[in-house]
């Protein structure tokens, strides 16, 4: 399948060790916001260290390609475990998250590293809704692939909360020191959305904050008075600042 990759190149030379990179899912709709916020927050003389922004999108220009993103950002599921869609239509094809993860690892990230001097321990992934689900799946399935993860309004309910089984396996790997290198941080963000979405995210984040793993931190950001769509710009802003602040030391 074809993808459209958006890249914002920093104006300044990289800091020692190379540029950090933030990868943004749903690039057609979210890349420009992430790129502009990054430009503003890295302005000299007082800004954070320069960084590369990469958006993962699709040909055609639609802000959110429902068919493609449903496949790319979800894990395999039993149809009986999925709710009816609000529009009453059948679910599009789903379950391709691991294929996109493999694309990140084998093609997208190596291509960015060929083009720029990259610090591999300063690479973040941001996603919203199904994108937030994908971010959490990436953390639990391949925790060493990125250093920082930001999940906004994550669809934790997917496939009757099967993601929580992945989380339990992730915790077991943490306890057995099977993950190397450890990711550095996770931020889970959300707004005043459906009660269960907020509760799901808060509960998962609270559990992760209680892990107290040296070198790994989890945090929660609530954007009040924002619903599922209006929360996006604020979540991106929080994500970029969270990541730049953590990687500019």
Image (spheres, helix red, strand yellow):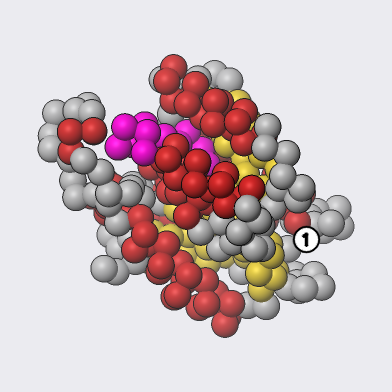
Q: Position of residue 112 (x, y in %)?
A: 55, 74
Which residue appears at 31% of the width and 32% of the height?
160
The magenta segment is: 150-162
Relative horizontal placement of residue 170, taking residue 76 as reference (left or right):
right
Q: On screen, 45 above or below 237?
A: below
Relative horizontal placement of residue 131, taking residue 159 as reference (left or right):
right
**Residue 159 in magenta stretch:** yes
Which residue appears at 13% of the width and 37% of the height?
90
Determine crowd level at label 1: few under 14, some 14-19, many 20+ residues with C-alpha closer than 10 A: many
Q: Position of residue 83 (x, y in %)?
A: 23, 28
Q: On screen, 225 above or below 169?
A: above
Q: Position of residue 220 (x, y in %)?
A: 63, 31
Looking at this view, is 60 or 83 the one in front?
83
Q: Quadrant of residue 144?
A: bottom right
Query: In which quadrant is the C terminus drawn?
Result: bottom right
Residue at the outermost right position: 45
Residue 175 seen in this snapshot: yes
Which residue appears at 66% of the width and 63% of the height?
181
Looking at this view, is 199 or 239 the one in front?
199
Looking at this view, is 87 or 195 the one in front?
195
**Residue 45 in magenta stretch:** no
Residue at the outermost bottom position: 114
Residue receiving disc 1: 49
Looking at this view, is 123 or 136 the one in front?
136
Residue 10 seen in this snapshot: no
Q: Quadrant of residue 157?
A: top left
Element under disc 1: loop
Which residue appears at 19% of the width and 28% of the height?
84
Q: Position of residue 18 (x, y in %)?
A: 73, 73
Relative horizontal placement of residue 248, taking residue 204 as reference (left or right):
right
């Amino acid at each position: 399948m074809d993808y459209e990759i958006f890249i914002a190149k920093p104006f300044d030379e990289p800091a020692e060790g190379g540029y950090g990179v933030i990868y943004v899912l749903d690039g057609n709709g979210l890349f420009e916001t992430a790129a502009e916020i990054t430009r503003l927050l890295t302005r000299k003389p007082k800004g954070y260290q320069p960084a590369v922004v990469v958006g993962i999108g699709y040909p055609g220009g639609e802000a959110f390609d429902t068919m493609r993103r449903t496949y790319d950002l979800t894990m395999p599921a039993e149809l009986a475990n999925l709710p009816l869609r609000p529009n009453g239509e059948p679910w599009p094809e789903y379950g391709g998250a691991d294929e996109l993860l493999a694309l990140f690892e084998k093609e997208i990230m190596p291509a960015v590293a060929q083009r720029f001097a990259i610090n591999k321990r300063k690479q973040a992934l941001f996603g919203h809704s199904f994108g937030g689900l994908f971010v959490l799946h990436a953390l639990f399935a391949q925790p060493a692939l990125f250093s920082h993860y930001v999940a906004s309004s994550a669809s934790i309910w997917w496939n009757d909360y099967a993601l929580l089984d992945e989380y339990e396996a992730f915790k077991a790997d943490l306890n057995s020191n099977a993950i190397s290198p450890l990711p550095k941080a996770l931020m889970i963000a959300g707004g005043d959305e459906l009660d269960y979405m907020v509760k799901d995210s808060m509960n998962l984040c609270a559990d992760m904050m209680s892990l107290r793993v040296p070198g790994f931190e989890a945090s929660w950001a609530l954007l009040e008075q924002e619903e599922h769509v209006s929360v996006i710009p604020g979540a991106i802003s929080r994500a970029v600042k969270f990541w730049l602040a953590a990687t500019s030391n």
